[in-house]
Amino acid sequence: MLAKKYRLSHQDFQKFSDRGFYRQNDYFKFFICPNQLNFSRWAIVVGAHWSKSSVERHKIKRQLMNLIKDKKELLNLPYDIAIWPKPILKEKDFQFIKEKFEKAVALFLNQKNGPNP
């Protein structure tokens, strides 16, 4: 579990939706918004379209939160970031999810001059 400081609250999530931009690939949709902090805040959104089972929804949330937590450099970015994993990941194993998540983060967040809107 990420420390509370690195998680977006519901109120913050609603506020930042008009100031950021989207990026997506076949497996994830990212909403990225610059913040005035020296650390990033994350939200993972997994709705009922993912699965009717809350166990399955919470599993992907835990997996993604642990990937973020393990990559310390992701916590030092000056962005608020929301992630929507796509339902196709339901059929994939953790190693595949990890590989695709790291590739997506590298593409969307670690560009030379930061993300381009």
Image (cartoon, rainbow, N blue to C red):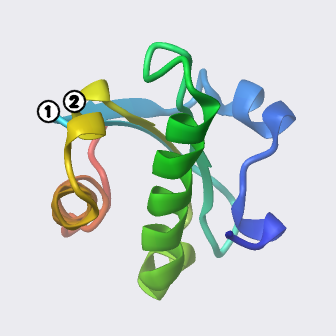
Q: Which residue is mark 2?
A: 88
Q: Quote the CA–CA distance across marks 2 and 1.
A: 8 Å
Residue 61's place in the image compared with 117, above or below, is: below
Give the residue drawn at x 65%, y 75%. Answer: 38
Which dot marks residue 26?
1
Q: Amino acid at mark 1?
A: Asp
Residue 81 visible to the viewer = no
Residue 98 percent location from the top left of the image: 26, 65
Residue 26 visible to the viewer = yes
Residue 106 percent location from the top left of the image: 21, 65
Asked whether 53 or 13 is in front, the reply is 53
Asked whether 75 or 93 is in front, the reply is 93
Q: Amino acid at mark 2?
A: Ile
Give the residue drawn at x 43%, y 23%. Answer: 50
In screen coordinates, is 89 left or right of 72? left
Instruction: For mark 1, give the secondary structure.
Output: loop
Q: Quadrant of the N terminus?
A: bottom right
Q: Quadrant of the C terminus?
A: top left
Residue 3 percent location from the top left of the image: 76, 73
